[in-house]
Amino acid sequence: MFADLKDRLVLVTGGSRGIGKGIVSHLLDAECKVVFTYQNNGKAAEDIVDAARHQGAQCWAYQADVSDPDRSRTIVDNIEKDHGPIYGLVNNAGINNDKSFLTMPQDLWTRVIDTNLNGAAYLSQAVMMKMLPRKQGKVVMMSSVSGMQASPGQSNYSASKAGLIGLTRTLSHEVARYNIQVNAVAPGFIETEMVAGMSEKMRSQIPRIVPARRMGSVDDVAKSVLFLLSGAADYITGHTLVVDGGLST
Ligand code: NDP
């Protein structure tokens, strides 16, 4: 479907599970070279790499905490040294740690902002510095509808996801003349471990609050990410693509 992505090197953060794993799988189907990161789940990462190599695909996994700026810089240097120029970056890694804002301990606030927003900023800077002289590249931020509308109990998460939309817009202008496109995807409810803790009551309300009457799948999100990485999106930048079955409209 996205033939122009063949042989491109794409870096995906948080590729060991959920949406990131789905993105990795779709990129491998498009015959990309894929590097993905994970934080703790080494076994899951190893299984993905083994399965990909078994199919003859080129796939590598690196352990890296995205909230560590030094690690972001060294990992990007190492990836380019070992595997060639990075064409696309997907800042997918993210966490939620929900609690009412007024009683939220500071470390809960900091951890979520550090991972979701600062992590994407550190890696984007490191990768875009490499893309700039090549005058080519695509960056996709994984935002959320929680960054676009009120989401009580998720002040840290929604602030981080709204921050990513602002970062996307501003970065897109700073690098547009270098033929680098920066866009965001804002999923609604997607069936992954992140939403596994959702109460049965909330789950039963999905058909009422989501016009598509179902939760989204990782494939729904992955396909939109591949579109934004592909040549079909060469003149799209600073945009947030909402993938929510109509939830936020
Ligand atoms: P999961 O919890 O299923 O997976 C999270 C991934 O991020 C894992 O690969 C995890 O690695 C990695 N990760 C977490 N923290 C770090 C870190 N500090 N450094 C590096 N990697 C890290 O999440 P989802 O797949 O559901 O979500 C993926 C993205 O999509 C997130 O940004 C999320 O906010 C966003 N999103 C999700 C929605 C949903 O409904 N699921 C809706 C809207 C947005 P490891 O396996 O090693 O722990």
Image (cartoon, helix red, strand yellow):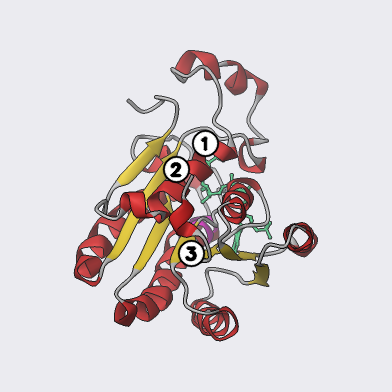
Screen quadrant of the C terminus: top left
> In this figure, which residue is indicated by the disc labeled 1?
220
Q: Is mark 3 within 8 Å of ligand 1?
A: yes
Up-down relation of residue 181 to residue 98 (above or below): below
Secondary structure of the residue carrying numbered label 2: helix
Label 3, label 2: how far apart the Cα atoms are = 25 Å
> In this figure, which residue is indicated by the disc labeled 2?
224
Q: Which residue is found at the position 34% from the left and 35% from the top?
A: 149
The residue stretch that appears in magenta:
108-114
* Relative depth, front residue between 34 and 189: 34
Q: Which mark is residue 114?
A: 3
The kind of residue tagged 1 is Asp
Up-down relation of residue 245 to residue 220 (above or below): above
* Relative depth, front residue between 55 and 165: 55
Q: Which residue is found at the position 52% from the left and 32% from the top?
A: 189
Q: N-terminal of the two: label 1 or label 3?
A: 3
Q: Is residue 124 left or right of residue 45?
A: left
